Image: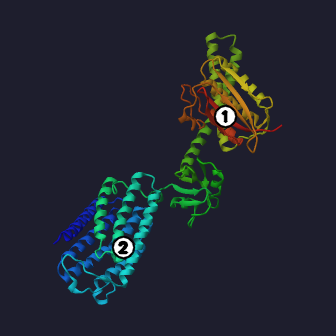
Amino acid sequence: MDTAHTSQVLVLLASTAIATLLTLHAWQRRPAVGSVSFALLMMAVSLWSLAYLLEITLPTFAGKLFWVKLRFLGMVIVPVVWLLFVWEYTGNEKWLTRRKITAVALTPAITLLLTFTNDTHNLVWSTPDASMARPFMALALEYGLWFWVHTAVAYTYLLVGSALLMVHWRQQQTPLYRRQVAALLIGLLLPWVGNVLHVIGVSLLDLTPFAFAITGILMVRYALRFRLFDINPVAYRVVVNSMEEGVVVLDRKGRIVEANPAARAIMRIPTNPIGRTLLTVWPDLEQMLNGAPEKSIELPAPHNDTCYYEVTISPLYDWRQALQGRLLIIRDITERRAREQLRNDMTRSMVHDLRVPISNTLFALQMLKGDLDEVVSADNSLLLEMTFANTEKTLQLVNQILDVHRLESGKLPVAFAHVRLAELVQRVFAVQQSRAAEKQLQLTAVLPDDLPPAWADAGLLERVLQNLVDNAIKFSPVGRRITVLAAYETTTAVPKLLVTVQDEGPGIPLALRQTIFEKYVTGEQGETGSGLGLSFCQMALAAHGEQIWVEPTADGGAAFVFSLTAVPT
């Protein structure tokens, strides 16, 4: 045996050994995605290499012909298992049905049957001359019609698998996963080229097993380095389709490009919704989105008013940070809303029942103050004043809770009228002047003389300003300033007034700015309140169709800004 033959044997032995090791490596990683199918792929490669090794080393014609048939067994299995592996690895498990697998395996199965019965029909290859059987030489086969049918189908499988991997590679954002896919593509390329060279007659020797030996070395390196079957990108469809929450992906034009089974059940879509606009399947949701790139909203189901859902909207950007669409996560909050409604009803009922006895107590204390001013001692008079003030504050809190509930249920009427902001601010400052004086605070109004009136409910708007100024006084250090500013905005479709209540306090922490207007949320600066003042402001302005938000100031304080509809003069 000369050096060339020795090299062939060593390379085929290496190919067989490496493919066997990769088979064991992948099999031990099951049930990782693609591990079983990859193990079968490498096992077929190992059989292919081993059969080819024995074909060229055996000296007898019968022995060589037997191993040719087994070599074809590996050749038939490789493209089928490759395609199944790619389907699984790229997250297309929905294609792994019994019918599709049977269809993919049909032509290879026929090829295998014809291979082992080739002596009767010669459709796979013409029977070679026995005298051509020589040691360390493969049989020179003249391929028949069915071989070319099998080759066309096999190359189609390889091409489809490679295309799917290319798409999967482009979809990956994590470098580790991109390298995994790249390793698989490189590993496929060399055997493919080697097989093509042999089939078209450029090389009399089948280079495919040799190429698989090189591929095996690459795969050993990359499978270990990039942890091919230890860390896999979990397929999107596997995760999303098993979620209880609905998941909908919209493109820039509001068309549905993806919807998992839970979302389809919520929207009661019997057919595929891909390509339909959200307006056609859930009009209320489309209206509430209103072009906002990111927020969370609650609304009833499209076909059942008794079921409520929370929809979280997140923008989707491409690698250039250009907006490509939106992701909607839909959660069923029917039970949560029912619990909240029960709690609110109980709270409202209890608070409503407290209102009468507290009012009676306050009236009685007021009568006692008038009758006992000249009789009781100074200490008792102070205690009476404290009791009266606390009872009055309790009644205000009760009224505030009831007003918040009425705003939430839409039962608090909004009487729109022309409201002069300067007059309103003067009344608020007059009420808050004594509290401001205790902390030596300066109340300042910066209002343009030509400021147009607002279209609002004067009573509700005054209470909004009272709450905001009261809040600023509560959190302002001694000797600072509280400023009420207003500006007239004409750049919007409807002219607006932007009103700002600004203090020089410690400001609102960033983490608290998102929740500061929720009920029962209080500040973190030491002083606490009912947690209803800012919530009332938000709901009162929402009843006007307006918004309120908080901004930091240049000196570290807080600026509460809200909008009002202006009435041009």
Q: Which amino acid lies under the numbered mark 2 shown in the image of this protein?
A: Val
Q: Residue at horizontal 35%, vertical 58%?
A: 32
Camera-side residue of 158 and 455: 158
- Residue at the location (69% across, 29% down)? 466
User: Who is closer to the viewer here, 209 or 414?
Assistant: 209
Q: Is mark 2 on a helix, strand or loop?
A: helix
Q: How crowded is mark 2: few (under 14 residues within 10 Å), some or many (20 or more)?
A: some
The answer to whether one can see residue 242 in this image is no
Q: Residue 252 location, x and y as percent?
A: 60, 55
Horizontal side of 225 relative to 156 (left or right) equals left
Find the residue positioned furthest to the left. Answer: 1
Q: Is residue 201 visible?
A: yes
Question: Which residue is pictured at 41% across the width and 72% down the height?
Answer: 157
Pointer 1: what residue? 561
**Which of the labelled discs sits on residue 196, or is there none?**
2
Q: How crowded is mark 1: few (under 14 residues within 10 Å), some or many (20 or more)?
A: some
Q: For this rendering, which residue is in front, 443 or 291? A: 291
How far apart in space, not on screen, are marks 2 and 1 (Cα)?
72 Å
Name the image quarter holding the N terminus.
bottom left
User: Residue 160's spot in the image, x, y percent?
Assistant: 43, 69
Residue 298 % position (x, y)? 60, 49
Q: What residue type is labelled 1?
A: Val
> Which corner quadrant of the image does residue 67 belong to?
bottom left
Residue 160, placed above or below residue 547: below
Where 14 sits versus 484, above or below?
A: below
